[in-house]
Image (cartoon, helix red, strand yellow):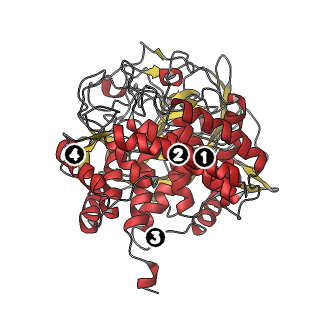
Amino acid sequence: MTQATRPSLDLGVIGNCAFSALVDARGAIVWCCLPRFDGDPVFNALLDPSENGSTWAIELEDFERSEQQYEPNTAILRTRLYDRQGQGIEISDFAPRFINRGRTFRPLTLVRRVSVLGGSPRIRVLLRPRFDWGRQRPTITQGSSHIRYVGPHTALRMNSDVPLSYILSESFFVADRSMNFILGPDETLLTGIEDTARGFEQETSAYWKHWSRALSVPLQWQDAVIRAAITLKMSLFEDTGAIVAAMTTSIPEAADSGRNWDYRFCWLRDAFFVVRALNSVSEVGTMEDYLRWLNNVVVRSRGGHIQPLYGIGQEAHLSESVLEHLPGYRGMGPVRVGNQAAEHFQHDVYGNIVLGAAQAFHDHRLFRRSGRMEFGYLEAVGEQAFRVHDQPDAGMWELRTRARVHTSSSLMCWAACDRLSKIAQTLELPQRVLYWRERADLIRERILREAWCEERGAFAESFGGRDLDASVLLMAEVNFIEPHDPRFISTLAALERHLCDGPYMRRYEAPDDFGRPETAFNICTFWRIDALARVGRHAEACEIFEQMLANRNPLGLLSEDTHEATRELWGNFPQTYSMVGLINAATRLSTSWDSVI
């Protein structure tokens, strides 16, 4: 038996913009998909902690307590384990990422380095990968200093300077020196095991510290912002430029809710907000990578329907299925692979595309700025936005059995036309400026007339409706309405009365396919913080923000949802949308640097 604890989201993430892994509080790797974010989880104990699951644990005999922290300003995670005698070890985990020969080196490799903190602690190594979503045990072969784990379609090689007999037998042994483990492709190392691991760590540490140093952070909450920014960066699949919404599948939005979804894909909505948040701290490289991916999506659409999400390699078909053999997070299935939302019509996608691409027309720092050719492609997206701005859709919350003309979808269609007019101004195309301004004004007038509910004193979630929805708070963020407009202030007040549980805000009030949501949606709470700051309620915004910071897990990360009563995190992890909200709130609320320098 392992020392595995009850699964929780007290997890750290390591990664290198090619793949990632999640590490629990005792240093066990409980989730890692290969060869990319949406691949087969070779370690899946997060969804199956039983003996049938797969994990990579380094266990300490007579374990008593653990400590965990990131090396500051890096993606290197350090876990300290102590036994009852006070003896201990430190595990350093990372995925190599650094510049080598003018290119970014990001191999599909996990490095674990173990050092002794004191005494003669006894440890054992449980390295139990599996393939085909846990259904396939590997064939194991041994070399002089490596072990191969061979599956039906791939093979992993673990190089180590630990006696391999102890690893294969899963025996406890005395840790009397530093140890190194390198798990990756079935390839021979070019240098010695210790030299390779140490060199990879030094180079990776230097890379992340230089990357973090270039960020333009707010004066307050700097460490929280840097950790959020690094986490967002690790959510980038650099090969194509896609950004995943989260690194997991099927962590339920609430206990036994059945709201279990696969988030390991690129939602155009989430990706835009990631790019915008990183831009706010002067990290434009991710935007340039994402624009490569987005441009492919736009060109292939030929002015027609665009899905709300695609696979990170631009896969359009993400068929959803249930894996019956996996028990799920804390036994709360189902475990889903793929996402039916790819088949939805979600009309806000067109605004998210134009908003995501707009900066490339205005930002002189970029290596490749967009021009008239790219504008032509975006105009086709704008035409589609105008065609559908008053048509029913599934909405941004991806309702599966109900279609309405959602206010947030129409809002983002307005944003598409509005930003096209501004791009045309930059490109000195006066006729197109007028063309898109007229269309934006038509949509705006329609929203103001048909989304306003006099009975509720608020903008409703759909045209002619009365139900409330937090997404209308985006009206101020995308500059649709002045925050001091009485209608926006009244809307905010109505949302606080009906959607808030203390500081937390739920998405909407109307029951959906699963009933009424019972947890708060973290990004909605951050929208509330932004709105409060915009209307001048700065002290309240800061108070709620501090509560959200306190709700992060011990390593400063957030999932999708928070339970109002227990404050426990739920939903897929780490959720990029939530980390975006943290950066945006800190940037808006922080005291100016001018106040101290």
Residue depth check, mark 1 versus mark 3: number of the one nearer the observer:
1
**Quadrant of the drawing holding the N terminus:** top left
The residue lying furthest to the right in this view is: 101
Foreground: disc 3 or disc 4: 4
Q: Earlier in the sequence, mark 4 or mark 2?
A: 2
Estimate the x, y position of residue 393 in percent, counting from the top left: 44, 26
**Depth order, front residue of 149/116:** 149
Tell me which residue sits at (66%, 30%) in the image: 314
Horizontal arrangement in the rendering, residue 474 relative to residue 140 (left or right): left
- The residue beneath circle 2 is 440
| Category of crowding for the residue at label 1, using alpha-carbon neighbours closer than 10 angstroms: few (below 14), some (14–19), many (at least 20) | many
- Find residue 562 and report its horizontal and vertical position in percent: 28, 43
Q: Which residue is mark 1?
A: 436
Give the residue pinned by disc 4: 457
Task: Kindly state the secondary structure of the residue where label 1 is placed.
Answer: helix
Q: Looking at the picture, which amino acid does disc 1 mark?
A: Trp
Q: Provide residue 131's location: percent of width, then percent of height.
A: 57, 21
Secondary structure at badge 3 equals loop
Question: Relative to residue 213, is residue 389 drawn left or right?
Answer: left
The crowding category of the residue bearing disc 4, from other C-alpha atoms within 10 Å (few below 14, some 14 to 19, many at least 20), is some
The residue under the point 29% across, 67% down is 536
